């Protein structure tokens, strides 16, 4: 079988961010742009984590514009780079958690996931490529750094002459010396969910009148939700909204938050609200959770899920520990303390949870950005969170609002919000962070209004398993009483810089658990603007998105 070696030139801008390489589609469509990155992945995998040489590779993506084309290229390049078996989701589709599951289940040495997650799609939208390693999780920083290094000097890539098989044809196909296996993207994942949750109990609750809506936002979770929620759990047709994936997500952002999932939020706040509402993102790893009259903040959802996980069969024995990304609120810390289990604070991005999960130090992980998951895979998992909530609702027989209020009575309430300033001038954003870092040492003990700074630092993390160190992960200002302001720059944007400001205030007094979030955080928002010099350096008076 002829393998073609194609000469190419480096682009120099293929540095993976928080979650792989993300660029605009036209940028990705430049000659050999995707090929360069994929060859660098295979070369880095061979050098670091085990790549081709007779092993298995999983390939799939969220179905956005350009997905199928890159899937076919990746298949042909994998065949030319020594992979014996290439497992591909039908029509090139795999949600991120389903891909993670397949990598683990098939003993693959890794997987390529094509997605730009919650970013918009279409011919002028975003595209992304991410490499996951043999544990099913995102490649650790050492591997992504090596991939980047290789993209800077790449001179050629390898690809088989032959075309990739028809992506719709389930079954095994030969390509060069490799077997390409096209699989149903939903089946293995749905089976995994049945081993974790009490499907009988959830089915009975739905049959008994528990009502729900799931908004797939025209993205990858549509087929998964139809199969699991409607077919296997018996929710009526129409439970899944926007369940047909489209290449441009119906023209919206597949981002499950109050801005982009506003119709679902309106439904849950209105007179015809079901008991439970949820949404997921482009690639199916995020979740938004709502109850009648309530949006559950992701940080609270993490804490509530951790506190109630034992109600689902897979976690009946209890959880080993909890991990959260640094900007995620400390609500989960209070649960870990009460349960007497370990609590880990990691940099932003799911890759930092992998070692903790592999070592059995934690069972549940989460991020403030609507990501929650457990040791069942090595990615965050939107439908998993939905099913754990449903399992808890079915067992407790209480409403979402009652469960949240009960949680706050037990642990106190952590008011929380993230403010995003998007498409800010990159130099201005860097300058803002630089200035904050310069002033960190002098902040300790300083008073702002009613708050005194207890400590301020630029977060760095030492992985307790492999000892690797990640520095510069965000400026953290902690006030006495546990309030925090965190500043960091996004690593997933494709235009300019996105400044994220995370605000958090702890309120133990149950008499003050029904404040409006904006009111509860008003003082912190003012302090963030003045300390961060946001207005002065970016010209922005208001964030673009509050989540
Ligand atoms: C954002 C979130 C982060 C998440 C990442 C990938 O990163 O803040 O928590 O892990 O997106 O999510 P950043 O660097 O833009 O803040 V997704 O659903 O790509 O896979
Ligand atoms: Co995502």
Image: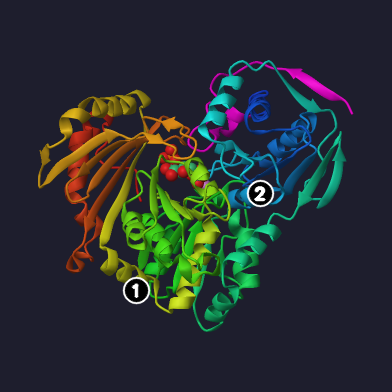
In this view, 182 is above or below 467: below
Q: Position of residue 164 (x, y in %)?
A: 81, 38
Asked if marks 1 and 2 touch (Cβ < 8 Å), the reply is no
Tell me which segment is drawn in magenta: 1-29
From the viewer's perspective, tell me whether residue 183 is left or right of residue 384: right
Residue 94 in sight here: no
Colour convention: rainbow
Q: Quadrant of residue 491?
A: top left
Is 405 situated left or right of 202 in this image? Answer: left
**Residue at the spot of label 1:** 402
- As for residue 500 lying within the magenta part, the answer is no
Q: How many callouts does the rendering have?
A: 2
- Residue 476 sits in which quadrant? top left
Sort mark 2 into few (<14), some (14-19) or many (20+) by Cα contacts within 10 Å. many
SS assignment at label 2: helix
**Measuring 23% from the left and 55% from the top, which residue is drawn there?**
506
* Position in image of residue 381 (x %, y %): 53, 54
Residue drawn at the location 57% of the way across and 56% of the way down: 376
Indicate which label's residue lies in the foreground, 1 or 2: 2
Against 390, residue 110 (above or below) is above
Mark 1 residue's CB less than 8 Å from ligand 1: no
Q: Secondary structure at mark 1?
A: helix
CA separation in Å, label 1 and label 2: 37 Å
- Let me know if residue 28 is in the magenta part: yes
Judged from this view, the residue extending furthest toward the bottom is: 208
Question: Residue 104, labelled with which disc?
Answer: 2
Counting residues from the start of the chain, the first of labels 1 and 2 encountered is: 2
Residue 375 vs 515, above or below: the answer is: above
Q: Position of residue 346 (x, y in %)?
A: 40, 42
Residue at 28% x, 28% y is 432
């Amino acid at each position: 079988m002829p393998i073609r070696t194609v000469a190419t030139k480096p682009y120099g801008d293929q540095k993976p961010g928080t979650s792989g390489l993300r660029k605009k589609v036209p940028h990705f469509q430049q000659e050999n742009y995707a090929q360069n990155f994929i060859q660098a992945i295979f070369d880095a995998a061979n050098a670091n984590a085990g790549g081709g040489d007779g092993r298995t590779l999983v390939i799939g993506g969220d179905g956005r514009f350009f997905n199928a084309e890159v899937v076919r290229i990746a298949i042909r390049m994998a065949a030319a780079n020594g992979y014996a078996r290439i497992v591909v989701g039908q029509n090139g589709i795999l949600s991120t958690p389903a891909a993670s599951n397949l990598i683990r289940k098939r003993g693959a040495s890794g997987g390529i996931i094509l997605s730009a997650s919650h970013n918009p799609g279409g011919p002028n939208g975003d595209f992304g490529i991410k490499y996951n390693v043999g544990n099913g999780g995102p490649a650790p920083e050492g591997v992504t750094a090596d991939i980047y290094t290789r993209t800077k000097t790449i001179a050629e890539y390898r690809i088989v002459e032959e075309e990739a098989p028809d992506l719709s044809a389930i079954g095994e196909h030969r390509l060069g010396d490799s077997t390409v296996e096209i699989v149903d993207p939903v089946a293995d994942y749905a089976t995994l969910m049945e081993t974790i949750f009490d499907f009988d109990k959830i089915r009975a609750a739905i049959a008994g009148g528990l009502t729900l809506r799931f908004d797939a936002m025209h993205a990858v979770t549509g087929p998964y939700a139809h199969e699991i929620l409607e077919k296997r759990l018996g929710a009526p047709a129409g439970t899944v909204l926007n369940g047909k994936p489209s290449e441009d997500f119906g023209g919206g952002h597949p981002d499950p938050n109050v801005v982009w999932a506003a119709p679902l939020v309106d439904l849950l706040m209105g007179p015809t609200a079901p008991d439970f509402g949820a949404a997921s993102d482009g690639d199916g790893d995020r979740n938004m959770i709502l109850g009648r009259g309530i949006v559950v903040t992701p940080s609270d959802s993490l804490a509530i899920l951790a506190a109630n996980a034992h109600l689902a069969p897979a976690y009946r024995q209890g959880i080993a520990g909890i991990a959260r990304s640094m900007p995620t609120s400390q609500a989960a810390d209070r649960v870990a303390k009460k349960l007497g289990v370990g609590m880990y604070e990691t940099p932003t991005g799911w890759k930092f949870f992998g070692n903790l999960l592999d070592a059995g130090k934690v069972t549940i992980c989460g991020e403030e950005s609507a990501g929650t998951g457990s040791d069942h895979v090595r990615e965050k998992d939107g439908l998993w969170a939905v099913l754990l909530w449903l399992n808890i609702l079915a067992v407790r027989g209480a409403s979402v609002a009652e469960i949240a209020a009960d949680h706050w009575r037990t642990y106190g309430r952590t008011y929380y919000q993230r403010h995003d300033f998007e498409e800010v001038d990159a130099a201005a954003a860097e300058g803002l962070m630089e200035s904050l870092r310069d002033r960190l040492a002098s902040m300790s003990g300083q008073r702002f209004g009613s708050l005194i700074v207890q400590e301020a630092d630029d977060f760095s993390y030492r992985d307790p398993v492999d000892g690797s160190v990640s520095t510069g992960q965000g400026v953290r200002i902690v006030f006495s009483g546990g309030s925090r302001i965190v500043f960091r720059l996004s690593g997933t944007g494709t235009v300019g810089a996105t400044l994220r400001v995370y605000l958090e205030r702890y309120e133990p007094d149950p008499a003050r658990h029904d404040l409006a979030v904006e009111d509860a955080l008003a003082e912190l928002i003012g302090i963030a603007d003045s300390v961060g010099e946001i207005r002065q350096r970016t010209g922005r008076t208001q964030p673009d998105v509050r989540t």
